[in-house]
Structure formats: C-alpha cells, structure tokens
Image (cartoon, helix red, strand yellow):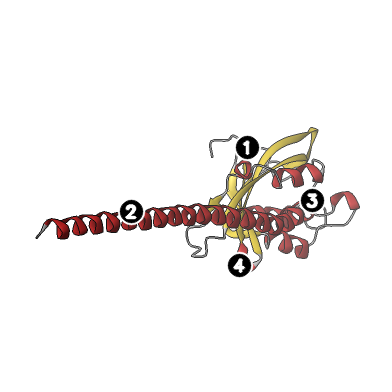
Amino acid sequence: MNRKSYILFFVFSVVVKFLIAQDHTVDDDNDTNFFEDTLFNKASDITEIHKSNRIIAWRYVNDYLEYSTFNFNKSIKMSQRSIDYFRSLFSDNAIVYNDLSETEGNYIEIADYIDNLSEYSIGKGIDVSYQEKYIIYNNLFTKNIHDLKPVLDPSDKNKQSYFYQVKIKKYVAAVFTNENRYLYLDEPRELDLLLKIHVFNSRNYAEITGIYVENSSY
C-alpha cells in the first residue's frame, strides 16, 4: 500500500468510526426516551386503574355501610332477604371480626356471622352505626394510594385487579351473649376496623374478603 492509499484508508476509517459513534448515540437517546416514556405511561396507567378501582370499591363499601345496619334506626325489621343481600357483598371464604359477640377478639367465617344474624335477629334487628360517611369516603379516596395498602391480584393477567384496605369506625350498641341473648351495652363499643376489598376491574365488580380490627395481630 503506497502512502496516498494509506492516507485515504486512514481517513475513511476515521469517518466510518465517527458515523457509527453518532448512530449509536442516537440509538441510546432513543432507547432512553423510550424507557422513560414507558415508565411514565405505566405509572399513568396504574394511577387510572386505582382511580377506577376505587370508584368500584366505593359502591360496595357504601352498600356495606347501608345494609350492615339492617335499617335498625328506621324501624324496619330485619328479614332473610336483607341478610342475603348483605351476604352477597362478601367472598365465600371471607373472615370477619365478630363485632356482635359479647366476647371481644374473635374472628369467624362470614357464613357463621350470617348464621348468627339469621338465628337471633330476624324480625328484631341489630343496633350498629358508623362514623360520618364522608370520612370513610375520604379514607378510600386518599391522595396517597399507599394508605390503602394496594396489593395486585397475581391471578389477573391484565394486572388491573387489586386488594385494598379501607378504614372504617363502627359503633356497636348491643351484642349477643354467650347464652344467645341480645344485650345492650352501657356505652356503644367503638371499633377501628379495616375492610379488605378485592376489586375486579375488568368485571366492574368487587367483594369484601375480610374485616379486621386495625393494628390487630390477626
């Protein structure tokens, strides 16, 4: 290779390396932008999912607040129909705090809770109430979604179904004794509860999977 050819080859090599470097830099920028855009879109999508899920959840939380009192304060007697509707708000294997028991600290399956209502309260009613509804609404629609301890349902391939925990304060004025009598307490029992609700976004449906005393070890 003569001197002239060598110089031309050297210049050509430098130009090619420069073009490759420029092309690689552009690809890196595009990859970075794509990665950032994907993260933004994912975060935006999740925010929208939680927004729609909470709207769905509120329907069921509101129904729980309405139907779990069984209209005691409206002088409408409890019926099997009202109990059945209340039962429909829960999953089959839901575990709930037995707030109507004279003995505190017990958890039972929702089926047993319903059996107690059917056996001892039909035609009579129970005396429970809740804090102002707007407070519970605000608890659900908190600005910080982490307050609801969202957990993704691993069985949902679309990654849209979540479990949430909603704080509610409940007042129980009367309980069932161990002798199955209905006993009015000297003062209503105040309970800070967590209502765990499973929202199925694609089905526009939700169900209560458990009710627990806040900060309990259960």
Measure how far apart labels 1 and 4 are at the Cα level: 30 Å
Q: Check disc 2 and give the amino acid type.
A: Ala
| Residue 34 on image: x %, y % | 48, 57
Q: Specify the amino acid type for callout 1.
A: Glu
Is 51 in front, or is 38?
38
* Residue 151 located left or right of residue 6: right
- Image vertical order of residue 88 relative to residue 150, above or below: below
Mark 2 vs mark 3, CA separation in Å: 72 Å
Q: Which residue is mark 1?
A: 214
Q: Nearer the viewer, residue 211 or 99?
A: 211
| Residue at image mark 4 | 202
Q: Quadrant of the C terminus?
A: top right
23 vs 212, left or right, is left
| Tag 1 near tag 2, CB within 8 Å | no
Q: Mark 4 or mark 3: which comes first in sequence?
A: 3
Judge depth for marks 1 and 2 and give the one in front: 2
Report helix, strand or loop for mark 2: helix
Residue 197: % across, % down = 62, 53
What separation in Å lies between label 4 and label 2 (alpha carbons)?
47 Å
Please tell me which residue lies in front, 173 or 7. 7
The residues tagged by marks 1 and 2 sit, at their Cα atoms, a distance apart of: 59 Å
Do labels 4 and 2 touch, CB within 8 Å? Answer: no
N-terminal label among 1 and 4 = 4
- Image disc number at residue 69: 3
- Which mark, residue 21? 2
Q: Position of residue 87 (x, y in %)?
A: 68, 60
As helix, strand or loop, the secondary structure at mark 1 comes to: loop
